Amino acid sequence: MRSVGIVGYDGVNALDLTGPHEVFNDAVSWPDGRAEAPNRAYKVFCLSPDGAPFRSESGLLFTADCALADAPPLDTILIPGGVGIRKAETLTPIADWLRARAPVTRRLVSVCTGVMALGASGLMDGRRATTHWAYAGEVARRFPAIRLEPDAIFVRDGAFATSAGVTAGIDLTLALVEEDLGPSAALAIARMLVVYVKRSGGQRQYSEPLRFQVRAKGRFADLAAWIPANLSADLSVEALAARVNCSPRHFARLFKEAFAAAPAEFVEALRLAEAAERLVSTSATVDVIADSVGYASGAVFRRAFERRFGVIPTHYRERFGSEPLAAE
């Protein structure tokens, strides 16, 4: 059984803490017939700087198992984010403890602004990391020695793993479980938690449809909902312009001003993002998926997919898929 220490403090983000805790806690194997208690792969300890209870930024009260100084040997240490970690009185003791524990700990992990504790410890100097997009600027200013990748869901660099905020902590923890116990265990937990799709670290924090909806205004607002729901339809400039009662030339100019991309580029991004999700969440063949998102042929789709993701669709499915592979 591997031991995991999750560090809490006043002002922690509750989901940054409880999301990873649930993933580790759900990593179990059952004896035949499930008549006995499950065999747990992890023992999770909830720690606080002084061992006292602490309250999350949303008001939830947590009880710590012990103080940082009294923590047992740990395989993995995880620092959640939250407004409290940005305060020196919280940040400094946690950073000092991390520095002392690093030589005898296999993995050091952060969620969201928890990366600030790793940054303050000096352990992340020169290393790649990420954080929630809303705090990337602050992390970069306070810890310029960190090689920040602000758009990633999570980043691994040796013994260190960092993630964006809230639900990204679940993605990262699933990846850690996969590393320890294999993909079947991680996917079983994802299904138990009803996670829609187990995202890889290299994916963007913003999905393509969400990025579209955030930036859509005025006459483009309805398109933000209509295009992702109709990816197999005619999404040419002429067809889209007709939907908003605009000439194709005027539409193309306004669209590029609004989204910093030509309509065709943006449609392709939406189609490929949806195709990637269908590859990992269904057993449909590549050709069927290509047709379902509007590609004229599987060959054209394969070339576009590899150009965007750097791998062919079948290799992407092998790496991230949760369903048995279909015949290609």
Image (tube, rainbow, N blue to C red):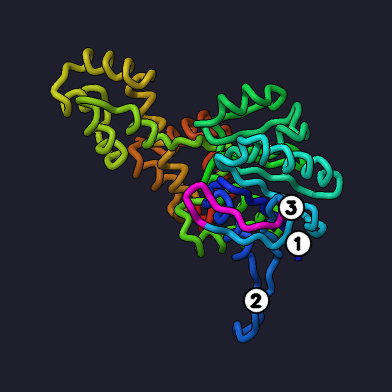
Q: Residue at x 43, y 37 (%)?
A: 207
Confirm or deny contact between disc 2 and disc 1 (CB under 8 A): no
> Marks 2/1: CA distance?
15 Å
**Residue 28 placement: quadrant:** bottom right
Q: How many marks?
A: 3
What's the amino acid at mark 1? Arg
> Of the residues under marks 3 and 2, which one precedes in the sequence?
2
Q: Residue at x 72, y 23 (%)?
A: 145
Check disc 2: other Cα within 10 Å, few if <14, some if 14-19, many if 20+.
some
Q: Which residue corresponds to mark 2?
A: 38
> Marks 3/2: CA distance?
21 Å
Provide the major secondary structure of the magenta segment: loop
What's the amino acid at mark 2? Pro
Percent x, y of residue 72 = 80, 59
Percent x, y of residue 266 = 37, 26
Q: Which residue corresponds to mark 1?
A: 2
Report whether 275 appears left or right of 214.
Answer: right
Q: Residue furthest left?
A: 245
Confirm or deny contact between disc 1 and disc 3 (CB under 8 A): yes
Q: Which residue corresponds to mark 3?
A: 76
